[in-house]
Image: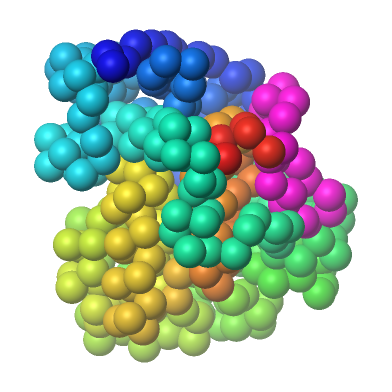
């Protein structure tokens, strides 16, 4: 039976501007896929990311090039071979997982031999602002368990200290998004330790992380922009102690599952993260999150409006979407 493939762009306005070291985001611009076969419909979502040379147009073009094969019944294994890791493959991979689950009647979590979805503690992110405003934002979410602090090279210690004073008992992740130099990284070791930071995410540009070879810091360093798929792992050794798995980097749950298992075998801590997206974008990532040391899946909570049957947030607890939303 031939499938029907529907590809659309969608914009989700944010409830508040989201600032990181690379700029300010006001909307989540996503590409969605619906793959219909008979009376079943698998869905997926991806976030094209300019940092990786992607746009909505380029992602849709990649998908359209495979339309004949997808309509004719292409599966996930062939998809891995036909498209590189990235947003286009992620959305299609998610739609295929969802469709397979509906056709077989077996939910994705059971196919992966994982426990049924349950509540998880997710990081809640504070974007870059003045130390005073970041401290006030931290006070509003203090006690939720895990806070992620976005910083750049402009006095990061003051911002981290402000958050720590307002949230004295929460675990902290600091994310400079490639904005530091090795000199600043060295200078920040004492402030990071003083604040009791648990994880430092991608401090240096990915193409400058040779400087991490031989670096001995007090805080574990997590690769984000530097690590996309399993074949990147050998290069992470000696530079990073953890990796951040995002479906838009791996090109979907299929490769993300391989990367998760390989990373854990090689002794890396694992974070499961996301772009700013809707619940449809993070639903597949929930299948990985129970295996992660850190979960950072608060993307949908930056939106003015998310899917009503999607994930929910109570304090720092991320509740899975309603049955039937994605993956069975």
For the N terminus, the quadrant is top left
Residue 302 part of the magenta segment: yes
- Residue 284 in view (yes/no): yes
Please count the marks in the image. 0
Q: Camera-side residue: 121 or 236?
A: 121
Drawn side of residue 138 relative to residue 31, left or right: right
Q: Position of residue 165 (x, y in %)?
A: 81, 68
Q: Position of residue 285 (x, y in %)?
A: 50, 49
Displayed quadrant of residue 121:
bottom right
Q: Camera-side residue: 230 or 134?
A: 230
- Residue 226 in view (yes/no): no
Q: Camera-side residue: 52 or 328?
A: 328
Residue at the (23%, 25%) spot, across then down: 73
Residue 109 part of the magenta segment: no
Residue at the (41%, 73%) spot, across then down: 242
Magenta region, residue range: 301-322
Residue at the (50%, 81%) spot, across then down: 219
State whether residue 142 is above or below residue 128. below
Residue at the (18%, 70%) spot, across then down: 235
Q: Position of residue 292 (x, y in %)?
A: 52, 68
Displayed quadrant of residue 267:
bottom left
Q: Main secondary structure of the magenta part?
A: loop
Q: How is the image coloured?
A: rainbow
State whether residue 270 is above or below residue 237. above
State whether residue 164 is above or below residue 74. below
For the C terminus, the quadrant is top right
Q: Position of residue 295 (x, y in %)?
A: 58, 60
Q: Camera-side residue: 236 or 180?
A: 236
């Amino acid at each position: 039976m031939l499938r029907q493939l529907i590809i659309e762009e969608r914009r989700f306005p944010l409830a508040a501007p989201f600032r990181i070291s690379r700029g300010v985001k006001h909307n989540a611009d996503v590409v969605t896929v619906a793959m219909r076969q008979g009376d079943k419909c698998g869905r997926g979502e991806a976030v094209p990311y300019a940092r990786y040379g992607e746009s909505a147009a380029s992602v849709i073009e990649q998908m359209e090039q495979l339309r004949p094969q997808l309509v004719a019944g292409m599966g996930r294994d062939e998809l891995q071979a036909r498209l590189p890791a990235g947003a286009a493959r992620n959305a299609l991979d998610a739609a295929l997982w969802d469709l397979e689950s509906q056709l077989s009647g077996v939910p994705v979590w059971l196919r992966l031999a994982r426990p049924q979805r349950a509540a998880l503690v997710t990081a809640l992110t504070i974007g870059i602002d003045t130390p005073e405003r970041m401290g006030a934002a931290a006070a509003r979410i203090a006690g939720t368990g895990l806070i992620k602090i976005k910083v750049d090279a402009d006095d990061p210690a003051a911002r981290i200290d402000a958050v720590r004073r307002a949230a004295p008992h929460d675990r902290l992740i600091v994310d400079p998004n490639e904005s530091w130099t090795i000199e600043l990284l060295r200078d920040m070791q004492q402030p990071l330790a003083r604040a009791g930071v648990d994880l430092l995410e991608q401090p240096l540009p990915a193409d400058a992380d040779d400087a991490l070879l031989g670096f001995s810091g007090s805080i574990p360093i997590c690769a984000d922009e530097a690590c996309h798929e399993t074949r990147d792992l050998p290069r992470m050794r000696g530079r990073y102690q953890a990796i951040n798995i995002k479906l838009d980097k791996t090109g979907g749950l299929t490769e993300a599952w391989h990367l998760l298992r390989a990373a854990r075998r090689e002794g890396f801590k694992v974070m499961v993260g996301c772009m700013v997206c809707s619940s449809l974008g993070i639903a597949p990532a929930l299948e990985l999150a129970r295996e992660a040391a850190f979960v950072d899946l608060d993307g949908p909570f930056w939106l003015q409006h998310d899917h009503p049957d999607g994930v929910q947030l109570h304090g720092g607890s991320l509740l899975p979407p309603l049955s039937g939303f994605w993956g069975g």
